[in-house]
């Protein structure tokens, strides 16, 4: 079946550096992608989304890049802060369902 | 607060027990979802309700029984569970099933089956 996967299970960055979290997807028909953040003891929280007719979208300190040619999605976090430490999930919409990746754990060190 | 409240936050039950998980959303959404989150696995969609009607059941064992009395409330009734059912159960809601896709999640119920 189709799958959504993340390249790295863990990522450690220093406070103030930029973070890049990558995601590969295999369903070429996917038209919509979302990034979620899940902090310990909480449910996933929406960060940013992007439609397949775009290749870049910016939010507050976050940017999502979509490369449909290689079916790759990335989340960039600028000036990473301790509060950014969490697990980050990408998800792609297949039909009416969201298919989630396994998640990347981001650890921000002082 | 996300506007989606789940109770209880933690639940320990034996394999012969019957318990229920509750989810309530205050966002005026029409679609609600149950997900299972196990360690080192992607979120698994279990059930989808749209306007109180179940629209998807992803081959979930019958020991999990959902109930959606109205668009704001969703229950997951549990009976004769197995230890491998121990996981975080997440409820989510969205404007409707065909919306942009943004689903808002509750904090989850951490279930342990002994």
Image (cartoon, grey):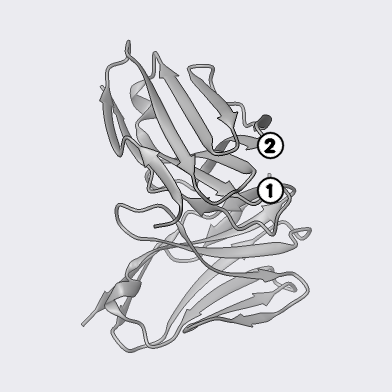
**Looking at the image, residue B108 lies above or below residue A17:** above
Q: Which residue is mark 2?
A: B51
Is residue B40 depicted above or below A25 in this figure?
above
Q: Chain of mark 2?
A: B
Q: CA distance from mark 2 to mark 1?
A: 8 Å
Q: Nearer the viewer, residue B102 or A22?
A: B102
Look at mark 1 in the image and give the residue it sits on: B96
Left/right placement of residue A14 relative to residue A60 reads left
Residue B70 vertical position relative to residue A94 in the rendered view, above or below: above
Percent across and percent down for residue B74 are: 51, 33
Q: Which residue of the protein is positioned furthest toward the top in this rendering?
A: B16
Looking at the image, residue A84 lies above or below residue B45: below
Give the percent coordinates (x, y) of residue B71: 60, 37
Q: Are marks 2 and 1 in contact (CB under 8 Å)?
A: yes
Residue at mark 1: chain:
B
Front-most of B110 and B25? B25
């Amino acid at each position: 079946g189709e799958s959504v996967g993340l390249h790295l299970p863990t990522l450690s960055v220093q406070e103030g550096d930029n973070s890049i979290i990558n995601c590969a997807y295999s369903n070429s028909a996917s038209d919509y992608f979302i990034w979620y953040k899940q902090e310990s003891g909480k449910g996933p929280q929406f960060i940013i989304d992007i439609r397949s007719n775009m290749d870049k979208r910016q939010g507050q300190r976050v940017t999502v890049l979509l490369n449909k040619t290689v079916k790759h999605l990335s989340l960039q976090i600028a000036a990473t802060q301790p509060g950014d430490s969490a697990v980050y999930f990408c998800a792609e919409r297949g039909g009416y369902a969201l298919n989630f990746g396994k998640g990347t754990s981001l650890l921000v060190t002082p | 607060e996300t506007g989606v409240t789940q109770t209880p936050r933690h639940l320990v039950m034996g394999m012969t027990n019957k318990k229920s998980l509750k989810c309530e959303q205050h966002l005026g959404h029409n679609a609600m979802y149950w997900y299972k989150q196990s360690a080192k696995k992607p979120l698994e969609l279990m059930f989808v309700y749209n306007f109180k009607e179940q629209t998807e059941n992803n081959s979930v064992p019958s020991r999990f029984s959902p109930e959606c009395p109205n668009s704001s409330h969703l229950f997951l009734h549990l009976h004769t569970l197995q230890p491998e059912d121990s996981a975080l159960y997440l409820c989510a809601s969205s404007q409707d099933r065909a919306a942009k896709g943004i689903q808002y999640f509750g904090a989850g119920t951490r279930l342990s089956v002994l």
